[in-house]
Amino acid sequence: MPYSESVIRRAMERLRLSAEEKQAEYEAHLAEAYEKYPRLQQIDRRLRESAAEAVAASFRRGGDPKAAIAALEEENLALQDERQWILDASDYDEDFLDDSPVCAVCGGRGWVGAKMCECLRELCRQEQKKELAGLLAGNERFENFQLRFYPDVYDPALGASPRHMMQLNLGACRRYANNFRKGSGNLLFSGATGLGKTFLSACIARQVADLGYSVTYVSAGKLFSDYERVKFSGADDQELKKYTDCDLLIIDDLGTEMRTQFVVSALYAVVNERLQRQQATIISTNLRPEDLEGRYTPQIASRLLGCYQLLSFVGTDIRPMLR
Ligand SMILES: [Zn+2]
């Protein structure tokens, strides 16, 4: 699950802070305990000294290092017992002087070799959702999708009622989100403004992020302006990696941007690269499928119509009914 660099950076920063906090808490507890039980401090000091003496003894020539080390070990055990008695007799909780790392698996580093530890992965999931939270209003869940706003009247042009068509779309989106995995296919939402395309794509974004995948949600206008800025200002193109590397990219409102030669080639680059890497993409557009070729290019139209599952959004603008 390739999270963007910024998500990983923020997650690692949080892990570092929680390790620091835990260490600071331990030190404060220790100072408190030393104050109350000065003998504890003496014991700890002696334990450190005897550890150093054991090392020194093992390197010493002549004499019997084994006997010296055994004596130190015995003293050590006695000191540890005494330390434990003091703590047992105190009214401190058992973990009051716990100095274990925040994560026992990775020691709080977040990585075990090159593999991301589950503790860091969980923080990435949370950071990823925060990133989406800025774009989501909060109620984007499939169960909040209001089918009743779509006419339940047979439409001969559709061969069904708009409500029935939307029910099928809702089911398809739900299945897509629930079964999401790397390489899940692509969806193309086509239909006029106000028919729920953005809402359903946001429902998918939320659900897929909840499953622990990296999701980037962006309007077409923002996507193209980011590409343009990087291209023409020579800015760091790492910024664009979130569009090419994420498990699911959702491009909202394709067709509302200014159409320039640059936009056409950037769109082709994104769509094509993600197809080649078998990374899932959802595009919503107010363009009709037959308009794609004229607006962009035959190559783009053939990729969108050939490699994306088309969901047609039908009905009447539901936004006035939501107010
Ligand atoms: Zn860990």
Image: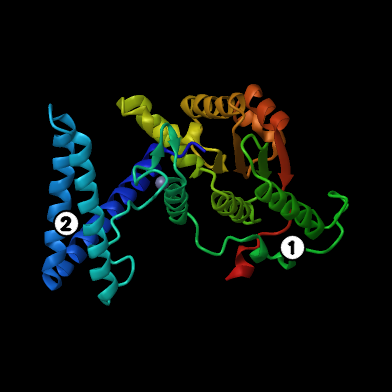
Image location of residue 301, percent across then percent down: 66, 28
In the rendered structure, find residue 111 and report the number of the disc placed on it: none
On screen, residue 265 versus residue 127, left or right, reads right
Q: Please name the residue that numbered disc 1 is placed on.
A: 150
Q: Earlier in the sequence, mark 2 or mark 1?
A: 2
Say if 241 sits above or below 145 in the image: above
Q: Is mark 2 within 8 Å of ligand 1?
A: no
Name the secondary structure under disc 2: helix
Residue at x 35%, y 31% (from the top left corner): 229
Query: Which amino acid does the dot numbered 2 rest on?
Result: Asp
Image location of residue 201, percent across then percent down: 60, 50
Residue at x 40%, y 49% (from the top left corner): 104
Say if 216 sits above or below 87 in the image: above
Residue 298 or residue 214, whichever sits in front: 214
Query: Which amino acid does the dot numbered 1 rest on?
Result: Tyr
Say if 14 sits above or below 26 in the image: above
Residue 86 or residue 235, whichever sits in front: 86
Q: Please name the residue that numbered disc 2 is placed on.
A: 44
Q: How is the image coloured?
A: rainbow
Give the distance between the C-alpha atoms of the residues marked 2 and 1, in whole angstroms.
73 Å
| Figure quadrant of residue 227 | top left
Say if 166 sits above or below 276 in the image: below
On screen, residue 273 versus residue 35, left or right, reads right
